[in-house]
Image (cartoon, grey):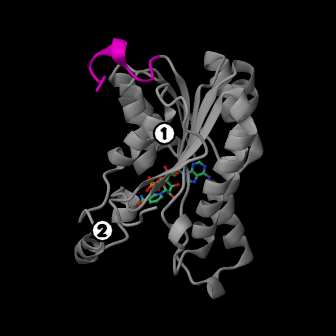
Amino acid sequence: MSIGNPSLALLRNKIAIITGAAGGIGSAVARLFGREGAKLLIADIDAVAAEQLTRDIERNQSQAFSIAVDVTRKSSVHDMVGRALSLWGRIDILINVAGGALRRPVLEVDESEWDAIVNLNLKSVFLCSQAVLPAMFQQRGGKIVSISSIYGFTGSETRASYAAAKAGVAVFTKSLALEVAKAGIQVNAVAPGLAATERVRSQYTDKQWQDRVATFPMGRAAEPDEVARAVLFLAQEENSYITGQTIHVNGGCLMW
Ligand SMILES: NC(=O)c1ccc[n+]([C@@H]2O[C@H](COP(=O)([O-])OP(=O)(O)OC[C@H]3O[C@@H](n4cnc5c(N)ncnc54)[C@H](O)[C@@H]3O)[C@@H](O)[C@H]2O)c1
């Protein structure tokens, strides 16, 4: 591992935008990328949390800036990308982490709720990817990694809008990968099973959590950092030939 030895850092001087960076998985990605030498734009709708994380990362000698973004709004996404370009003049990596679920039976989901979940999880990936592509085409390279979900592959009894959107992320990933492959741009996804972020953990009592993680072959949930390491694997230069793929980080509960 290169951590602690700057000359071996896997993302040395790479410019990375991370959306949803203030959340559980996003902040794990941001911290790991910072340790690996990337220059970061920490983008989240929660401006206060994004700024706190940025200060934390800077304390560890990494270069980071925060920006408030709503990834469901094209103008906001364009401001985010414009900020990265005005700071550094290039964008090497985009990590689409922002997302969230609605847990409700289909019969009870109204149209605006459906739109909100699909916009947050799927349209956001389209908008952010589209916005960074001109810079990546000009550079003749770049890496885009988006967070899908196991539910995008198994379906979910109570989260149809979320599962459909996350399936969309995986297929959008393949489609965009095909479209930009000759330009040297690689597009991949990571599909976590259950990651022990604050948001997810708070939805369970201790007993419910123990029962839930016991259903996993590895007998536990992922730490956010374990998801972040899969993202790093796809975002680093050493990944020179993987594109259009979704890596499943789920402790063995779904295999392909
Ligand atoms: N934790 C899990 O078990 C799990 C499993 C599968 C997939 N995922 C996916 O991983 C990603 C991160 O999940 P998490 O558990 O870290 O969640 P989280 O709630 O901790 O983080 C999500 C972040 O996205 C931000 N965000 C929400 N709406 C936004 C918007 N419109 N614009 C910009 N930012 C916005 C939030 O402020 C938050 O910081 C999500 O896409 C989620 O669907 C998580």
- For the record, the magenta segment spans 1-12
Q: Nearer the viewer, residue 15 or 2?
A: 2
User: Looking at the image, can residue 71 be seen?
Assistant: no
Name the residue located 49 percent from the left edge and 42 percent from the top edge. Answer: 21
* Mark 2, secondary structure of its residue: loop
Label annotation for residue 41:
none
Disc number placed over residue 50 in the picture, else none? 1
Residue 170 placement, left or right of 36: right
Secondary structure of the magenta portion, mostly? loop
Q: Position of residue 120 (x, y in %)?
A: 64, 57
Q: Secondary structure at mark 1?
A: helix
Which part of the image, by quadrant, shows the N terminus?
Answer: top left
Q: Which mark is residue 216?
A: 2
Residue drawn at x 54%, y 56% is: 148
Viewer-proximal residue among 95 and 246: 246
Q: In the depicted view, which residue is nearer to us: 60 or 216?
A: 216
Residue 99: x and y in percent read 56, 56
